[in-house]
Image (tube, rainbow, N blue to C red):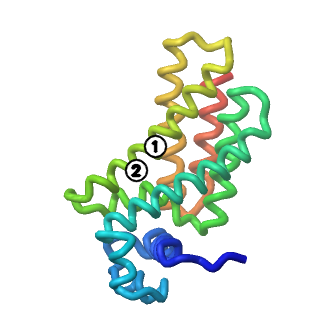
Amino acid sequence: MKKEGVQERIVRAASKLFYFDGYNQTGINRILQEAKVSKDSMYRHFRSKEDIAVAYLQRRHTMWMGMFLEHVNREEKGADKIIASFDFLRDWMIEVNYRGCGFQNIICDLPKEQQKINDQVVLHKNGLKNWIHATLKEESKYEDANVNEFTDEVMVLIEGSIILSQIQKDVWPITSAQRNCKRLLK
C-alpha cells in the first residue's frame, strides 16, 4: 500500500475537522497536529487555511456525488432517480449522525473574504442542480418550462430537507420532502 503523502494527510485531517468541528473553530495548528505535519511542509502544499478548505470541498464533492450517483442510478427512470435521492439523503443523514451537508455547514461558518470557498460551495450546489435538470430532461413527459421549474423546486426540497433534518436530528423532513417530490413529479 502506498504511503499517504503530506498533502493528502493535511486534506484528510482538515476534512474531518472542518466537517465535525466547523471551519472557524478549526485552526491551522490543529490541522497540522492531526495530520502530523510541520508548518513548513504544509506551506509547500497550501498557502492558507482557505486553500486547504478548497481542497477539502473538492474532495468532498467527488466523494459525496459518487455515493449519491451510485445510489440513485439503481433506478431506471429520471423521476424515480430523483425520488430515490431522498432515500439516499435519509440513509446518509443517519450515517453522519445528522451532521448535515459539509457545504451548507461551511458556508454558514464563512467569513466574507473567503471567496474561493464560496465558489466551491456554489460549484457543488450547481452540480447537483444540473444533475436534477438533466435527469428530468431524460423523461419526455415534462415540457421544457416544467423541467426548469421542477428543477428549482426539487433543489429546494433537497436542500431544505437536509438542513431541517440536521436541526431536528430526525429524518422526518427528508420523508416529507420526498412525499412532496412524488406529488410534484408524478
Image point 44% across, 55% down: which residue? 103
* 181 to the left or right of 121: right
Q: Position of residue 71 (x, y in %)?
A: 73, 46
Q: Nearer the viewer, residue 43 or 98?
A: 43
The kind of residue tagged 1 is Lys
167 shown above or below 72: below
Q: How far is disc 2 from disc 1 in space, using C-alphas?
A: 6 Å
Q: Are marks 2 and 1 in contact (CB under 8 Å)?
A: yes
The kind of residue tagged 2 is Val
Circle 1 — which element? Answer: helix
Q: Nearer the viewer, residue 151 or 17?
A: 17
What residue is shown with label 2?
Answer: 121
Q: Position of residue 126 (x, y in %)?
A: 45, 38
80 shown above or below 39: above
Work out which quarter of the rendered image holds the C terminus and state it: top right
Q: Position of residue 157 (x, y in %)?
A: 52, 39
Work out which quarter of the rendered image holds the N terminus and state it: bottom right
What residue is shown with label 1?
Answer: 125
Label disc, if present, on residue 28 of the rendered structure: none
- Write down the quadrant of residue 93 in the picture: bottom right
Circle 2 — which element? Answer: helix
144 shown above or below 29: above
Image point 64% across, 24% down: which residue? 185
Image point 52% across, 72% down: which residue? 8
Image point 43% across, 89% down: which residue? 33
